[in-house]
Amino acid sequence: MSFVGFAAFEAGGDDAPATTKGFAGSDRELRAACKQCGKRDATTRLKGLRALADRAKTVEDKAELAAVAAWWADAKAVEALGFRDDDARVRAAAFDALETCA
């Protein structure tokens, strides 16, 4: 008997809804920064928030920024990104990233 992995337990088929965890935009750097923002440790979250703010300043596609702003508006994302974080640096970086993306 061989182990088939956890993929065997996932719902498959074409009618299954396509769900992604985190930001699902087309800009690779924005996706990577948003993924870092969702990490548990404060250092990685801080790096992700700073990368998100830096990339949002240089992105040319305004629709992509609107998608990031919509992602920010999600209450789960805001809570996960650090507005309730114990580290003051993370809270400040979250505020700066929100200002840049809005």
Image: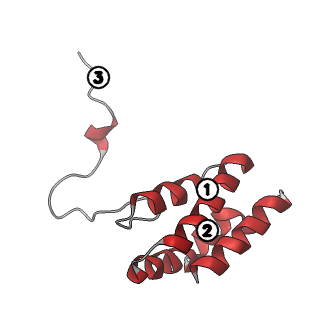
Foreground residue, 55 or 45? 55
Quadrant where the N terminus is found in the figure? top left
As drawn, the label of residue 101 is none
The residue identified by callout 2 is 53
Identify the image quadrant of residue 48: bottom right
Q: Earlier in the sequence, mark 2 or mark 1?
A: 1
Q: Which residue type does callout 1 highlight? A: Gly
Number of the front mark, 2 or 1:
2
Is 16 left, or right, of 101 in this rendering? left
Name the front one of labels 2 and 3: 2
- The disc labelled 3 sits on which kind of residue? Phe
Looking at the image, is 65 positioned above or below residue 77?
below
Q: Give the quarter of the image for residue 79.
A: bottom right
Residue 61 or 94: which is nearer the viewer?
A: 61
Q: x, y percentage for residue 51?
A: 59, 59
In the displayed structure image, the side of residue 93 where residue 14 appears, left or right: left
Q: Is residue 54 left or right of residue 28?
A: right
**Disc 3 target residue:** 3
Q: Residues within 10 Å of mark 3 (few under 14, many from 20)?
A: few
Residue 31 lies, in percent from the top left, at: 45, 59
Task: Say what amino acid the circle numbered 2 marks.
Answer: Ala
Q: Residue at x 46, y 72 (%)?
A: 59
Where is residue 86 shown, x and y percent of the image? Answer: 83, 58
Give the residue pinned by disc 1: 48
Query: Secondary structure beneath disc 1?
Result: helix
Q: Quadrant of the C terminus?
A: bottom right
Question: How far apart are labels 2 and 3 at the CA level?
Answer: 43 Å
Relative image position of residue 64 (x, y in whole percent): 41, 76
Q: Are marks 1 and 3 in contact (CB under 8 Å)?
A: no
Dot 3 falls on a residue whose secondary structure is: loop
